[in-house]
Image: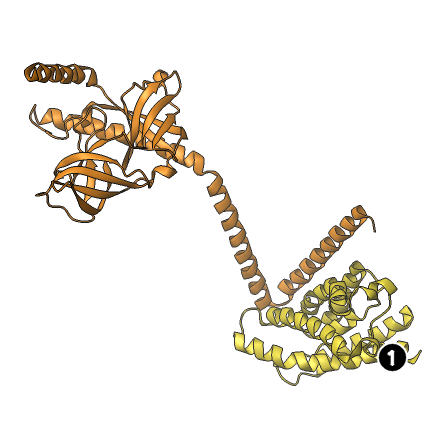
Chain colours: A orange, B yellow
Amino acid sequence: MPRKSRTITIILTAAIFILLEVAALSMIVRGGELQGIWVSRLSHRVMGALWGSSESVRDYFSLKSQNESLAQENYRLSLQVARMQNAIENAGGPDAGVGDGFAGDFRYIPGAIVKMSKNKQHNYIIINKGYEDGVRPQSGIITSCGAIGIVEAVERNYSYGIAFMNTSFNVSARIGSEGVVGPLSWDGRSTNKAILREIPLQTRFAQGDTVFTSGYSTIFPPDIPLGTVTGSGIQDGTMYEIYVTLLEDHAALRYITIVDHTGRDEIIPLEQMEDKKEGENEE
Amino acid sequence: MKSSRFFAIYLCFVLLQVLLCNYLNLTYYLTLSLLPVLVLLIPVRYSTITAIIIAAVTGFLVDFLGDGVLGLNMLALIPIGLLRNGLLNLVFGQEVFAHKEDVTIQKYGLLKFSTYIVIAQALFLIIYIAADGAGTRPFWFNALRFAISLPAGTLLSLFVADTLTKDYRDR
């Protein structure tokens, strides 16, 4: 039998089979009350399963747009938090909010990672926002639970940044919201492990303690949770090095927020002036 | 066997099935049905579509003349018509189709023929018992009904098969 004719026969057979079975079922539904309820229940169950499956498939394919809308929402909330903190600061006078005073001075720009290397010792990120969107070099790249990198170079629509997974990258971090501060850097191996160094031996901490950004920089806002303490070791007999499991898995990133300190242009010259003075004194 | 003679005997067995449905209600646990074997023994030269239609008409006739729920036998019998060729291929192999010869107990032996009938009878009973119970009877009841009806139905079907294929044996 030719292939085409065989296909037609199969389709015809299936159609007749379904038609006759549906006819039989409809007779049963009309004939017996119990059978009617049974068929109706079965059909509801089948329809429920079908709708459920199609809903899951639809949900899966709409994840991208949902993520985008969540990123927008995150951006809006970050702005709102920054404004609120600014308002609290202003209401409390010049001494209020010491330690977290920078929060109100940050500008937030939502973005997405378009490219990111993960397998090198010096990894990089490319973001879909450039100077047309207001991105400046030395801006921070964050998520709600991680410092992801620093913008190094900016083009019209894209920016290039050094990723946290880079052995030359440090974030100023503290244990707990008021603990001691040290540089947090990537452990060089895993996508969600880091080491917090230069922690004095008298420091008290426990496994599970959260590590936050310290805010001692013009790049990252304070109090972004970065990870939790999972262990510690002693470095050169004088300092602790604390092992941190990051809250954000850097291998699975897509949406980020770029943070730009609006007062950086004033702070950096002051820092440079201080460095110059120290240099002169040493001479 | 000539088609006219086959279908005359076929019709007699359909009427016998109607009588069984109406007058032989020994127990709820026993469902005697000759219908699956009747569909299985439709000559091989008839296509699957024809087998499905014959099965549907047979089921409808028994439902219409019997005192059960209309559509019940039809619902359970149509899949047998659909799967008849598949079962023939599974149990007896491709040669049945090559020679277009009808299957008989004498030619293929009791074991193969019983397997052929048991599979069809089981399928028929599963659908029939499930639809008849309509989800109101407990599983053990349905299982017991199936366990009793399957051997009884198979034995009766072997007798029917022997009668329907007698012509071939006598040749």
Left or right of A226? Residue B33 is right
Q: In which quarter of the image is residue A221?
A: top left
x then y, percent, for residue A124? 36, 28
Looking at this rendering, what residue extends furthest in the bottom direction?
B26
Q: Can the viewer see residue A52 in this picture?
A: yes
* Placement of B74 over or under A117, stated as above or below: below
Please state which amino acid type lies under the numbered disc 1. Lys
Q: Can the viewer see residue B30 in this picture?
A: no
Q: Which residue is drawn at 15% across and 40% down?
A: A236
x then y, percent, for residue A10? 75, 53
Residue indicated by mark 1: B166
Q: Which residue is drawn at 30% across and 18% down?
A: A136
In the structure shown, which secondary structural element does the residue marked by tag 1 occupy? Answer: helix
Q: Callout 1: residue from which chain?
A: B
Quadrant including the C terminus of chain A? top left
Q: Nearer the viewer, residue A250 or A131?
A: A250
Q: Nearer the viewer, residue A56 or A254?
A: A254
* Placement of A230 over or under B85, stated as above or below: above
* Placement of A59 over or under A215, stated as above or below: below
